[in-house]
């Protein structure tokens, strides 16, 4: 469903726009996702609404069939990209899983601020963003995804999330449409 409204107590949740992730090959340029996420962040900050910057610093325990990481990541791998800050009032959430809710303070921090809706952006659409959107929906938040402020390493996975999953979890819209809804 196309984004129609934003709750007065909305928050922006930016997923994994960190130095080690934005350098990965994606179907849409990561630089565009960063720029649009920065536009959203500035609009939320200007309205006095919270901005949550989520970063991943490890992987969840358990087996998977993916290749094991080789070598050590760069020292700044988990640093939020400078275009986003963090700014003084931003809340940085560090996760070890795909999604930003499990094992973090995200839900607690949102509830403390009376947040009823989350707007999501970031990388990767089908992994961190979708996992966070699903959990937000399960936690009872209204969910909106900025579809031009997300990208993935896999085009089919990106399209599946944007076309089939996100509309079932809430609303979707472009960065410009969401900024316009902020008024």
Image: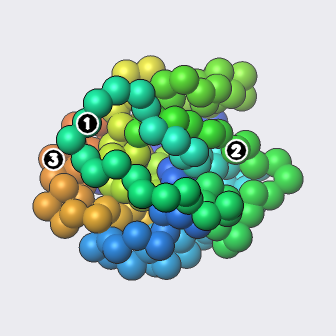
Q: Residue furthest right?
A: 88
Q: From the viewer's perspective, is the residue at label 2 or at label 1 nearer?
A: 1
How far apart marks 2 and 3 lie (CA) works out to 29 Å
How far apart marks 2 and 1 lie (CA) works out to 28 Å
Residues at marks 2 and 1 touching, judged by CB atoms closer than 8 Å: no
How far apart marks 1 and 3 lie (CA) works out to 25 Å
Tell me the residue that label 2 is attached to.
Answer: 92
- N-terminal of the two: label 1 or label 3? 1
Q: From the viewer's perspective, is the residue at label 2 or at label 3 nearer?
A: 2
Q: Quadrant of residue 47?
A: bottom right
- N-terminal of the two: label 2 or label 1? 1
Q: Residues within 10 Å of mark 3 (few under 14, many from 20)?
A: few
Tell me the residue that label 1 is attached to.
Answer: 64
Classify 177 as above or below 50. Answer: below
Q: Position of residue 121 (x, y in %)?
A: 47, 56
Q: Residue at x 56, y 59 (%)?
A: 73
* Element under disc 3: helix
* Element under disc 1: loop
Q: Residue at x 55, y 57 (%)?
A: 72
Q: Residue at x 72, y 22 (%)?
A: 112
Q: Position of residue 44 (x, y in %)?
A: 66, 55
Instruction: Assign the C terminus to one quadrant of the image.
Output: bottom right
Identify the mark at residue 164; answer none if there is no mark: 3
Q: Position of residue 174 (x, y in %)?
A: 39, 65
Q: Residue furthest front?
A: 71
- N-terminal of the two: label 2 or label 3? 2
Q: Residues within 10 Å of mark 2 (few under 14, many from 20)?
A: some
| 95 displayed left or right of 66 | right
Q: Quadrant of residue 84?
A: bottom right
Classify 118 as above or below 177. Answer: above
Classify 12 as above or below 116. Answer: below
* Element under disc 2: strand
């Amino acid at each position: 469903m196309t984004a129609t409204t934003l709750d007065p107590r909305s928050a922006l949740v930016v997923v994994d726009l960190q130095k080690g992730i934005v350098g990965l090959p994606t179907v849409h340029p990561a630089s565009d996702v960063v720029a649009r996420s920065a536009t959203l962040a500035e609009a939320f900050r200007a309205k006095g609404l919270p901005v949550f910057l989520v970063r991943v610093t490890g992987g969840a325990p358990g087996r998977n069939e993916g290749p094991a990481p080789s070598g050590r990541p760069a020292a700044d791998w988990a640093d939020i990209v400078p275009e986003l800050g963090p700014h003084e009032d931003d809340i940085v959430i560090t996760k070890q899983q795909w999604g930003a809710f499990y094992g973090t303070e995200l839900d607690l921090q949102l509830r403390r601020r009376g947040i009823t809706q989350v707007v999501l952006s970031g990388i990767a659409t089908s992994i961190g963003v979708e996992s966070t959107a699903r959990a937000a929906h399960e936690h009872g938040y209204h969910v909106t995804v900025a579809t031009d402020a997300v990208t993935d390493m896999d085009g089919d996975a990106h399209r599946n999330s944007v076309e089939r999953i996100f509309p079932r979890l809430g609303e979707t819209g472009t960065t410009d449409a969401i900024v316009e809804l902020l008024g």
